[in-house]
């Protein structure tokens, strides 16, 4: 059966890079693409940033490819992650040969808990000038993200798994997160080490090559993965996956980039690498590997977009990637 892929380009450069990724997917497989709208422009036209139709499409498709939204990003991406039942945010940060990177040895994958922690939105102002936030950490979600992280490392040939936490201070919540990870490690006979997240930030900056897979609570995963983005040479390169029990959504880490939108010079690599993650998720391992090596070849030999020092257009880079497939 032909798999159905929901395609939601969104705003700004999402409209420019997503078509390249769709062409790449089309070149390596036979998929049915169903396009849908979301984002700032959609809100202007219809009053809603994320129409129900788009939400339902993502919920029911075999996988979703999303570009970026502008100011409405939170109104679009948070519900879309929920639509696909995502509990794990997978964010690889990898330096590529030929690309100028602060730390060229970096090859990391952050496995970020995607449903709770401090992002549950339970905030209040209890009296004038006094505000609170409730941090939710459940045993179930902690076990689920730990199991996902250990399995991900095993399946992808990564040796080291580090569990990030701050259980020395957040004794109850991160105590539970850490305990759950230890239990899952013991039950599955997985090796792991543990790191206080603040010290880990420093170690990741100085010696990223010593780390492989890092399992994190929600906020720590958001921050540490952005730190790692800075190590490998910029937002135009970073893909991500939002994975649920069955369904998943794939998106570049970057936003709509209004400063360059419409110029046709956005780097499509992050979105094409997200499409490679989508292929892997659907079981097309060889095709995913081909797409990755085509992107790596183009990053090394050119053409490249201005963010990487070249002067090629989005379309020219896309054509060069497809040429290599
Ligand atoms: P951004 O990621 O859009 O841009 C940051 C900088 O990186 C800009 O200088 C941009 O030109 C550059 N850049 C990003 N992607 C690039 C690419 N593929 N090729 C070349 N250069 C690239 O982040 P910013 O400026 O903070 O946010 C812009 C808008 O995007 C905001 O409205 C924000 O809300 C939204 N946003 C949406 C996200 C999403 O939909 N998931 C994620 C992050 C931001
Ligand atoms: Mg972030």
Image (tube, rainbow, N blue to C red):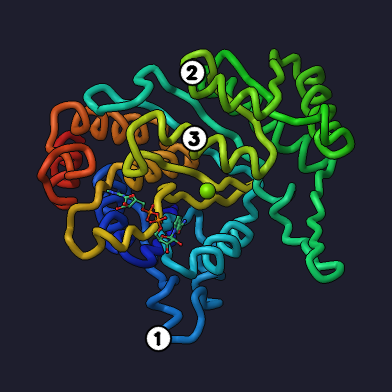
The answer to whether mark 2 and mark 3 are in CB contact below 8 A is no
Which residue is under mark 2? 206
Residue 7 percent location from the top left of the image: 39, 61
- Determine whether, in the image, residue 283 is placed left or right of residue 271: right
Q: Which mark is residue 227?
A: 3
Q: Give whichever of discs 1 and 3 has the lower sequence position.
A: 1
Question: Which of labels 1 and 3 is toward the front?
Answer: 3
| Residue at 71% across, 25% down | 196
Alpha-carbon neighbours of circle 1 within 10 Å: few (<14), some, or many (≥20)?
Answer: few
- Determine whether, in the image, residue 235 is placed left or right of residue 85: left
Q: Quadrant of residue 193?
A: top right
- Residue nearer the viewer, 154 or 251: 251
Q: Find numbered disc 2 in the image and state the secondary structure of the residue it sits on.
A: helix
Residue 73 percent location from the top left of the image: 49, 64
| Residue at 76% across, 20% down | 185
Name the quarter where the C terminus is drawn.
top left
Q: Find numbered disc 3 in the image and state the secondary structure of the residue it sits on.
A: helix
Q: Give whichever of discs 1 and 2 has the lower sequence position.
A: 1
Q: Quadrant of residue 99?
A: top left
The answer to whether mark 1 and mark 3 are in CB contact below 8 A is no
Q: Give whichever of discs 2 and 3 has the lower sequence position.
A: 2
Which residue is under mark 1? 45
Number of numbered discs present?
A: 3
Rendered position, 308 above or below 187 = below
Q: Does residue 304 appear in this view?
A: yes
- Label 2 vs label 3: CA separation? 11 Å
Q: Find numbered disc 1 in the image and state the secondary structure of the residue it sits on.
A: helix
Rendered position, 124 above or below 303 = below
- Residue nearer the viewer, 1 or 41: 41
- Label 1 vs label 2: CA separation? 47 Å
- Label 1 vs label 3: CA separation? 36 Å
Residue 181 percent location from the top left of the image: 77, 27
């Amino acid at each position: 059966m032909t798999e159905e892929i929901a395609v939601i380009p969104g705003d700004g450069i999402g409209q420019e890079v997503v078509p390249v990724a769709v062409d790449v997917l089309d070149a390596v497989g036979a998929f049915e693409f169903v396009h849908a709208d979301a984002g700032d422009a959609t809100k202007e036209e219809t009053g809603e940033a994320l129409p129900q139709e788009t939400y339902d499409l993502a919920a029911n498709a075999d996988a979703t490819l999303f570009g970026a939204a502008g100011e409405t990003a939170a109104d679009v991406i948070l519900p879309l992650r929920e639509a696909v039942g995502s509990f794990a945010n997978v964010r690889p940060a990898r330096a590529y040969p030929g690309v100028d990177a602060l730390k060229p040895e970096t090859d990391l994958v952050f496995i970020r808990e995607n449903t709770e922690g401090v992002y549950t939105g339970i905030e209040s102002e209890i009296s004038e000038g006094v505000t609170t936030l409730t941090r939710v950490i459940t045993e179930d979600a902690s076990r689920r993200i730990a199991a996902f992280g250990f399995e991900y490392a095993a399946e992808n040939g990564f040796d080291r798994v580090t569990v990030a936490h701050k259980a020395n201070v957040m004794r109850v919540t991160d105590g539970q997160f850490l305990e759950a990870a230890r239990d899952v490690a013991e039950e599955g006979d997985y090796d792991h080490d543990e790191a206080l997240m603040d010290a880990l930030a420093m170690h990741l900056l100085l010696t990223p090559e010593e780390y492989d897979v890092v399992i994190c609570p929600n906020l720590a995963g958001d921050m540490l993965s952005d730190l790692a983005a800075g190590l490998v040479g910029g937002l135009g390169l970073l893909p991500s996956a939002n994975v649920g029990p069955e369904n998943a959504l794939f998106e570049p880490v970057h936003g709509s980039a209004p400063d360059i939108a419409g110029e046709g010079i956005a780097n499509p690599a992050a979105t094409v690498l997200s499409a490679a993650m989508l292929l892997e998720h659907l079981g097309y391992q060889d095709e995913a590997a081909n797409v990755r090596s085509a992107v790596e070849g183009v990053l090394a030999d050119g053409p490249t977009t201005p963010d990487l020092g070249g002067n090629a257009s989005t379309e020219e880079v896309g054509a060069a990637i497809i040429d290599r497939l």
